[in-house]
Image (cartoon, grey):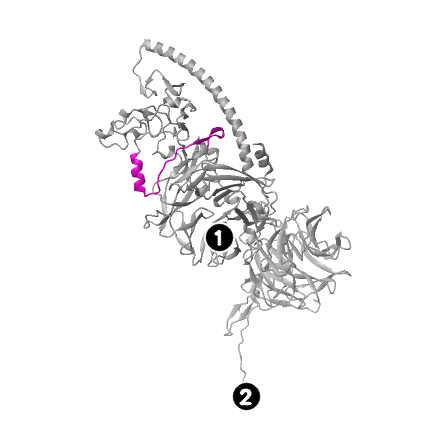
Amino acid sequence: MLRINILIVQVCACEQGFELESGGHACRDVDECQRPGGQPCSQTCVNTDGSYGCTCHPGYSLEPDGHTCKATGTEPILLVAIQFRLLLYGLRSLKEDILATMDKNVMISSIDYDLVEQKVFWTDLREESIKWISMDTKKKGTVVKGIRSDCIVVDWIGRNLYWVDGTAGQILAIQLTAVWRGKSEHTVVLDDDVTQPRALALDPLNGLMYWSEVGGEPQIEQAGMDGSSRKVLVDQGLGLPTSIALDQLSWKIFWSDEKFHCIGSANLDGTGITMLQLTQIKSPFAVAVFEDAIFWSDTKTRTVQRVKKTTGKNRAVLIKRSEQPCGLKIMHEVLQPKSSNPCLDAGCSHLCLLSPRSKGSCHCPARLLLADDGITCVPLEESAFLFLVLPTVIMQIYLKNLEALLGQSALPEHRMLPLATVNRLASLDYLVQEKALYLSELDNGDVRLLRLKESGKLSWRKILSVEGTVIDFAVDWLSGNIYWIDSENPHINVASSEGQCPTILFRENLYRPASVVLHPPSAVMCFADLGSQRDGERGSSIECASMDGSGRKVLWQKSQVPAGLTFSDSGTRVYWADTGRGLIESIQQDGSQYRIDRRGIEGLNLFAYGQGMMFWMTVDDAQITKVWYSKAELSESRWFQIDQKIVDLKVYSKHGQQGNNSCSKDNGGCSHICLPNPEGRTCKCPSGYYLANTSRCSEAVLCSEPSQSCKDGQKCVSMEQVCDGHADCLDGSDEMGCTSPDQNHSTPTSKNAGAGKRWTPKAAPPLQATGSTKARSPGPEGMNYPLRKTVLPPVVASESKTSETKRKGEPVQPKDSQRAKHLPCGTDFCNGRGICTVVGELRKCSCLMEYGGEFCEEPARGPTPGHIALSVTIAFSVVLVALGAFVYFRREHKLKRNNAAASRNLSRRKENGQEEENLMNSETFVNEAYDEQELLTLQTD
């Protein structure tokens, strides 16, 4: 008998959308969206349990097949440039239309469009121009001429047009609304290390641009649309990438490769490089991506073709002509989605380019430079520049010209300003807005102001004159005040913009002040004190204070000698050079964060800082002079050689001298000199005046012998009132420095103190003239009134204090004994309590009934009715006398003033003839900053 055994095997199976696990007994979900063969959806695939679903991006709809997404809205149009024609091809209707036909000698190579303005842009290689045509009205226009463009792209959000110049190795941009008027308004976005760019694509939504490089090693790079954040994206598998296109839906970049006859693609981070090679791809010129397809123009087959972008299947020839097709684009609103424009809030004066940070980046046309504020474009002559100060010549080098050196030792392009009447420059400062140059010379106590005229002549005049030499000075470009140090006394002085109202700002604890610098917007000043020559242990210091002299503090103190003291652009940091040790150092304005910025500089001599750059000069053993420069944050330095002696280095720019402080408008409300501080301002008075209130200076009183004036100059006191235990002066100065009752009244007084002579208090800085001057400052109507010199030898502070204490009780003799004749007779002379009249050479007070005394300084006893009547009669008579005297002296003064004016005009004409240098024959200096209105004003003065 035959026995048959049957083996039954159980096999597990899964439903659709699931697959068996490795054990063969359990089912798991299949992720159709991640299959190696490619996802089944044209855009977004969503995996579900046992299945999947396809979705589309905004602006697209899902087709009935459940896999394909199609753009909604208007029909997508294929825009193609075929030699001298612009052709429109409907991708749904398959209809052709001619947008424009140009002259037959036109060769259109690259095209793009802007749906906002309904314009099509194209580049004409033969005419080297970029033009446009309106799709609605067929109106035409020109954007730019004189350029070579291999590829143009529209930024529809930032409203700019970009192009690449393969010959010049540049990526450039211009506003979409630009109109050619004989001068281009484009800017260079990128030209560093760009050899031969060929194709360009923009991603305005993210502020990025992509370009292909065909010179040297071919590669595809990425950067911000402002040229920032540059990096290489693809540097392998490339032959000759002639065109690139972005597909934001698949997060890929596509390119056509003429050398390898293929179309390549990669993810937008440079990964996942693939090649689509078809026998039908012969010589691809331009490529575009839309929906699920790739489109390209082929100059060899003279066709425009399409294939599926993921597989290369479903190839179709859309256009075939006898002429060569070149540029092509797909026109549809989903390819230029609307978005906010960051440039609308940037405030750029000219061009604004998008950046990766969703911000606008200001750029300038080729002939302009971006100013310090980061938004304004200024001409080259108004941009930042370096002054090389030679003994009798000023050399001007624009910082832009330094970029062209590239490490060469040759002197950069520059301009020369020769000063024939200058023996040897000591210091200078420059007000860029006013185009005014202030300078001082060695062995000369003058500070002179020079203004440039369009005629080529240099006219100058004295602003300040002191004894000795002005070692260093600085001008507050906001208020015009001049701060200076001279060789006579260890003081820091200040005067108004015209050299008037000179006063000492610092006199205590100064030994050998050598330099002073200002930062007017923050109202802060700093100065270097090299210490007493007889006190070597003290060394040198750098101190800062408010520009009104308050808040003085020491930032740095060592035995080394600081040189080239200067502020950073923001004013928060102070820089200087240690020439002995070859260091460049800096410290915060509050004295913190000291650091060494440069080390080991051999032969360090001068230093300057400006526009974020450091400049310094070295002289080696062979007496070769080099000027070095470097970005402050970089260690790399460059230099150029100069075969002349340099006295100083200065950096200036128009926008580096902007801002305001409390004295920049209407002199801060002060009647004489306004000195700013970070919280406000301080009004100060010149010698012979006192501060009547917070802003007004009044003339100090004149005291007759044996009376003397109070320190504040407001009233006179008798010698019996000095140190009598009762403060008769408003400022209490009559009781200062008193020792004992026996000594109080033995204070010596001058036997020569005559009536009507001015007393100048010495211990009150607001009332003093500069200690280093015989300060001849221009007075009213151009007259120079000599101000008294306070002789203080440059000794230690204790000696200065002792000598000054000795003089506290002494009245000061005026040098001009006849000056009382010419002084005005005002109510201040009578303490505001009477009428001043002039009798002979003396001024007398007719006091009001409540007051008495020679200067109406004493209250009178209560009057009787008879006294009242008598007082009224006397007062009436005095008024008549005063009026008569006033008319008489006014006529006399007017006559003298006219005579003086005539004499002064004659001498001024002579002086102008001596103080004018003709630069008409100089080919080296050109005043491009000429202001016609200012010249007319100067010529009529």
Q: Position of residue 751 (x, y in %)?
A: 31, 26
Q: Is residue 815 left or right of residue 270?
A: left
Stretch in magenta: 778-806
Relative side of 550 to 93, left or right: left
1 or 2: tag closer to the N-terminus: 2
- Using the image as rendered, state which of residue 703 and residue 466 is in the foreground: 466
Q: Quadrant of residue 296?
A: bottom right
Kindly identify which residue carries mark 2: 3
Q: State the CA–CA distance, disc 1 to disc 2.
A: 109 Å
Percent of width and height locating residue 755? 35, 23
Residue nearest the observer in this picture, 896 or 171: 896
Image coordinates for residue 806, horizontal then vertical, percent:
29, 35
Question: Which three-letter amino acid code belongs to the residue tagged 2?
Answer: Arg
Front of the two marks 1 and 2: 1
Regarding residue 403, the answer to whether it shows in the image is yes
Q: Which mark is residue 615?
A: 1
Helix, strand or loop under label 1: strand
Residue visible at 51% across and 74% down?
Answer: 24
Task: Locate the N terminus by quadrant.
Answer: bottom right
Instruction: Name the amino acid, label 1.
Output: Phe
| In the image, residue 389 lies in the stretch drawn in magenta | no
> Is residue 797 highlighted in magenta?
yes
Is the C-beta separation of discs 1 and 2 under 8 Å?
Answer: no
Q: Farthest residue toward the bottom?
A: 1
The one nearer the camera, 875 or 912, is: 912
Can residue 479 be seen here? The reply is no
The secondary element bearing badge 2 is classed as loop
